[in-house]
Amino acid sequence: MNAPSVPPRYEIRALHTASTVTVYQAYRPAIGLPAARDGRFPDAWKRDRMTWIKPSFLWMMYRCGWGTKEGQEVVLAVEIDRSGLAWALAHAELSHYVSGVHADRAAWKDSLRTAPARVQWDPERDLDLKPLPYRSLQLGLSGEAARRYADEWTVAVRDVTPLAREVRDAVRAGQRERAAALLPVETPLDLVAPRPVRGGCPTPDM
């Protein structure tokens, strides 16, 4: 029997349609519940702060502890316009300096200072939230990118906290096949991507 294929080390995988991509975030109820109810981020959502979006459901579960960490109790699936994500990637800089990608550290710092988005690659997670040998994209949005994300790119917002708990409970009960079947289907995303995410330009672990 052939061993299962391992995804490329650096690849964007997401739940997506021809026009949208789903990313995940987790917020306190005061932000998350109105966002899910209204399908858009409330005025209390700070548009002048950096926000990180994650196309990986399991990486989000790792980050928010299945929606149990303080301030991350409401897990949101945010469906955004595909062209918006492409714009963010086209204007992104890597979150860490990489020799051979950047001319020098000073050039990287200058670019990072002005870029409205930043790319970071972190180990993907399995059902036990343990790291896998390939990476998952995190995309930080600030300034113009954050405002566009909240007010232009967002198509729909869903509260997937019940799903998070259902997957967690299935894992804890040893029902791994059931847990895996509940997961969003995340497949490689074919976008016109800039150098920071094309083919694998790594950043060091945080």
Image (cartoon, rainbow, N blue to C red):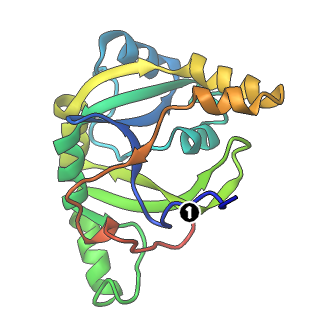
41 to the left or right of 28: left
Element on which disc 1 rests: strand
Rendered position, 13 above or below 203: above
Rendered position, 54 above or below 124: above
Image point (29%, 67%), residue name: 93
| Residue 70 visible in the shown view | no
> Which residue is nearer to you in this view: 202 or 71?
202
Instruction: Kindly identify which residue carries mark 1.
Output: 134
Q: Position of residue 167 (x, y in %)?
A: 66, 26
Rendered position, 81 above or below 75: below
| Residue 48 visible in the shown view | yes
The three-letter amino acid code for the residue at tag 1 is: Tyr
173 to the left or right of 201: right
Q: Residues within 10 Å of mark 1 (few under 14, many from 20)?
A: some
Which residue is the extreme one toward the top? 37
Q: Position of residue 121 (x, y in %)?
A: 47, 62
Say which quadrant the N terminus sits in.
Answer: bottom right
Q: Quadrant of residue 51?
A: top left
Q: Position of residue 110 (x, y in %)?
A: 25, 76
> Which residue is nearer to you in this view: 154 or 192?
192
Q: Quadrant of residue 124?
A: bottom right
Say which quadrant the C terminus sits in.
Answer: bottom right
Image point (45%, 14%), residue name: 33
Image point (36%, 18%), residue name: 35
